[in-house]
Structures are given as structure tokens and as C-alpha cells.
Image: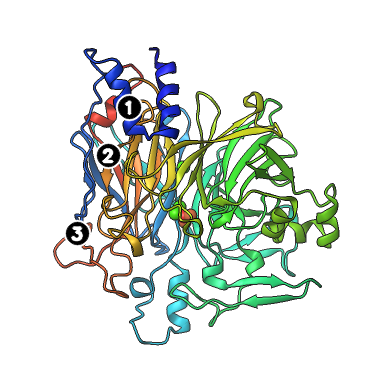
Amino acid sequence: MSDYSRREFVLFMGRTVGLAAAASMLDGCVSGSKLDPLPFVAIKPSTDDELKLAAGFSYDVLMRWDQVLNPAGDKFGFNNDYLAFIPLNPRIPNEGLLWVNHEYHDPYHNGGWRKGQPRTLKQVSLERKVVGGSIVHIRRTAGSPWEFVPNSEYNRRLDAFTLIPFAGGETIYGKKTAIGTFGNCAGGITPWGTVLTCEENYMNFVGEAEFDNQGRRTIKQVDGYLSWDKHIQLPPEHYGWVVEVELKTAKAKKLTALGRFAHECATCIVAADGRTVVYSGDDAMDEHLYKFISSKPGSLDQGELYVADTINGRWLSLSHKNVPILKKTFKTPQDCLVRTREAAKLVGATPLDRPEDIEIDPRTRAVIVSCTNNKKHDRPYGALMKIEEKNADPLSMEFTASTFIAGGPTSGFACPDNLAFDPRGNLWVCTDMSVSRLHEPPYENFGNNGLFYIPLSGDHAGRAFQVASAPVGAELTGPMFAPDGTLFLSVQHPGEWQHYKDYPASHWPNGGNSEPSPCVVQIRGPALERLTAKLDY
Ligand code: FEO
Ligand code: CA
Ligand code: CA
Ligand code: CA
């Protein structure tokens, strides 16, 4: 059986009987023949408080929370998430800028809050300093790991105080400029080398603006460990956008044309006519998958937003001008974008199981979407969904949607979230089982969150092999391959909630009785070199 047909068989069987079963059936078909060896042996699920890696992989900490970045005293933020590496000069791949999202804070670590106390304005101000994103200058010399370049002029922070204008000089809720960015979850890289950082759960920080039938606005306040709205009123309409950042200058703008919701990511592909298409998921139960088509090449300031009807395989326009129900409901095109979730429901978007990260298969142009889980519908394990645009054209208005690989006991992973394709076109998947449900049914056999390698061709196509297990309470996020094959990875929220609830404590990375710290690590080693080498092994 050719690689291609074998892969199709495994994926087809995976949909019906489960991947491991399908693969073993296939192995039975070719009994006597030898399977291609993988260059590593997958690890088993682990509950240990360490970043456990399969033999042949090793890691070094590259950046850690609170590390001083520059002479101004700016510090590396908390809960590192999405990572994007941009070479400073395309001809010098061993030196570049790393963008790091800092998704959210922890009041215990970041403002010094202690359980039972009221949170003060001073504490909230300290919390606002650790979110947003960092720009970090890194380089490596042959034979050595990547290193941070201290005090480089490029090392900068964007946080919840940074003034960021809306693209195109737009005014939103009375201002042309927003105060800060936060909830920065995943992101993307534009074809022109800027970074897109996505404001996801902004409502946990500042509440949400709600509108009645007459368009009257009220603010739904939040009460939780992330909330700032008792101390500072920031208009929710200023958040929930995709923010474009030029790393060399730290110049940023909020791209309103891509809509406002809990943006997980913003994944770009260039269409045949040079325009950029951006896919983005809204990570909440029964929310939607979106596609944006820019008006012209080289800019995302203007364009048209669409939302997916995955049942009928159609992209539904959210153009205020062209869709009568939207024109009738929202006074202006801007209102329609500010209230994207409502607009999507009006045109008939399909509710999905928390669409999170998205990557585009470099070989087939298939759009792979992580759907993490959906408690409402008792779908705890999630799945990777495949969107195949008609004629593989990102400008197409028609597509087919299918389950690519289902999470669960058969595939061995649960709750897929961040994705990356490696230089050879194979898929890497990080999992995001909620810390509050780790090790409990139905996740009792999955250990801590992990990182999985899924080859997409060859004898093991479509099977998930665990490469890494996260420390206690942590999630592995932001996988990003550097040009030299190094895998940058975020270790986010080790020991989450250990100071709030009776949850196991983490002491990663320093061990002993130390407090845990989010860090960015670099993963290298002979197994990774073989997986990412240009030549076949
Ligand atoms: Fe911030 Fe959807 O993960
Ligand atoms: Ca995420
Ligand atoms: Ca990704
Ligand atoms: Ca997630």
C-alpha cells in the first residue's frame, strides 16, 4: 500500500473505529513486513512534576517569568503562551526576535494577593504589567543552545498599559486608542513578517458589553481571580481583537476588520491573487470558526469577514452592507464587528466544540482546527477538524468539513489545542485538559497535559505519539519551530490554582520547595533532529 493510500486508510478507519485499532488492523495486513522505525519511543502519560521528554529529546529554559529584559527594567511577563520566531535578517537564521504572548496573570504571584484579602488597585496595577506580550532578542552560535540577548534594544514589552491604536484611525467607544492588550492566547505570522496576537478571554478581565433589542448597552461585570473591573473600567469593546505587532519597532494596532470575539488564533495563507486569508477560532462552547479575506495584498486593515456553516460547507458573509439581517440589526458596520458573535448567529453559523488553534497543512492546504471539547454536549475529548476548501483555494466560499483525528482513549490524547507543522509537514499537538479536571474521569488515564507528534505520511500516519508531559498543573503551548529545527515551547501555568484550591503543587522548574514559574523552553536532541531533518531517515 502506498504511503498515501495507507494514510487515507488509517484516517478513514480512525473516524470509524479509532486510530490505534485502525493502525493495528493495518499492521496486521502487512504482517511480516517491517514498519519504518520512529526515531523515538513515545512516553506514557505521566503525573510527575517535571517536563518529561521522550529519550532523544532534551530541553533548556530560554526565558522565565520576571526575567529583566532591558535597561528600563521591563520584565518578561507571566503565563507565556503563543510563540513566533522572526529572523532579524532572513539570510541569518540563527538570530531573531521571539514574540511571546503572556495570556493572563496569577494574583498570588503577580500582585502579592493572598486568599481571603480584598484585591487592591496596586495589586491590579502589578497584574496589568505581566500580561500582553514580550519581544525578545535571541541568537545561537553553532553547537550551543539559543540564548537571550540581554539589554538588546529590541527587548520590549506590550502590557495592559500600552496605548494601541485601532487600525485605519477608527474610533471605537469614543477612542481611537485602546489601553493595553491582554488575554493574548495564540496568534499567527503575516506573510510580511509581522506577528498577530489574539485577545481571547478579555471578558474575564474587564467584563462584557451587552446590548438589548434597542441597542442599549450595559456592562456585565465579572467576579473572579482575573477580574480588574472593580478597580479600573476599561471598555470591553476595546478588547477581543487581533493585534498586529511589528517586532523590530514594537509598533502595534488592533485589526477591527477581523471581528471581535474570544480570538484564539489568526492563521494566515496567501491566495493566488496575493490577498491574505486569515482563519480564526472563537474559543467558547458552541462558538464559531471564522475566515477573513483582506481587501488587498500586504494589509489586514480592511477586508470581509465570513463565518463557517460546517454542516453545508459554506462560508457565510458578515458584511453589514450586503447581508440584510445584519443591516437591520446593527446600526453601523462597526457595530456588527464589535458584536461579531451575535452577527454570526444571525446568519446561521454552526456551533462548534471550542475551536482553538488552526494550522494549514503545507502539503495539502487543508485547514486543521483544534476543537478542544464541549462540556455542554458531553464531548470531553475534542477532535481535530479538517476544512478542505473547494479546489484548495482559500478564497473559495465552499468547503468540506470532516473529523481528521478524534481525541479520546483510542488516539491517546484529549483536548487538542495548540498545533504546529514541523519542517517535514508532520503535525505536533499540545493538549489542554482543564487543570480543574485533570486526573479525574473522563481524563483519569491521560496524565498531565502533553505534546504529541502525529506523522502524516509513512507507516505511522495519523497515529499520535507522546513526546512530552507537562509539569503538574501546566499546559504546553505555543509550539514553534525555528529555522534550525529547534522547537520552542511554552510551559504555561505550572501549579495553577495550588494557592487557591486543594490542588497538587508544582515546583517546576527549580524543584525543592520553590514556587513554580512559567517558562519558555527550547527542545533539541537527536530524535528531533531526525524528525525535522531535510533528508529521509
Ligand atoms: Fe487560551 Fe483557548 O486557549
Ligand atoms: Ca490556547
Ligand atoms: Ca499554532
Ligand atoms: Ca486552551
Q: Amino acid at mark 2?
A: Val
Label whose residue precedes the other's in the sequence (3 or 2): 2
Which residue carries the number 3 mark?
510
Nearest the eye: 151 or 444: 444
Q: Amino acid at mark 1?
A: Ala
Label 3 crowding class (10 Å Cα cut-off): few <14, some 14-19, many 20+?
few
Mark 2 and mark 1 in contact? Answer it, CB < 8 Å.
no
Crowd around label 1: few <14 · some 14–19 · many ≥20 (10 Å): many
* Secondary structure category for the residue under label 1: helix
Q: Secondary structure at mark 3?
A: loop
Whether residue 149 is visible, yes or no, is: no
Residue 10 vs 115, above or below: the answer is above
How much space separates mark 3 and mark 2, taking CA atoms?
22 Å
Question: In the rendered image, which quarter contains the C terminus?
Answer: top left
Q: Percent from the top left, x then y, of residue 85?
A: 44, 41
Mark 3–mark 1 Cα distance, whole angstroms, equals 40 Å
Q: Earlier in the sequence, mark 2 or mark 1?
A: 1
**CB at disc 2 and ligand 3 closer than 8 Å:** no
State yes or no: discs 3 and 2 in contact (Cβ < 8 Å): no
Residue 126 higher or lower than 413, as above or below: below
Horizontally, residue 189 falls left or right of residue 433, namely: right
The quarter of the image holding the N terminus is top left
State the image coordinates of residue 238 (x, y, percent, origin top left): 64, 65
Identify residue type, mark 3: Asn
- At mark 2, the secondary structure is strand
> Image point 63% across, 69% down: which residue?
236
Residue named by callout 1: 23
Q: Which residue is mark 2?
A: 467
Quarter occupied by residue 535: top left
**At x 40% / y 31%, what residue is drawn?**
422
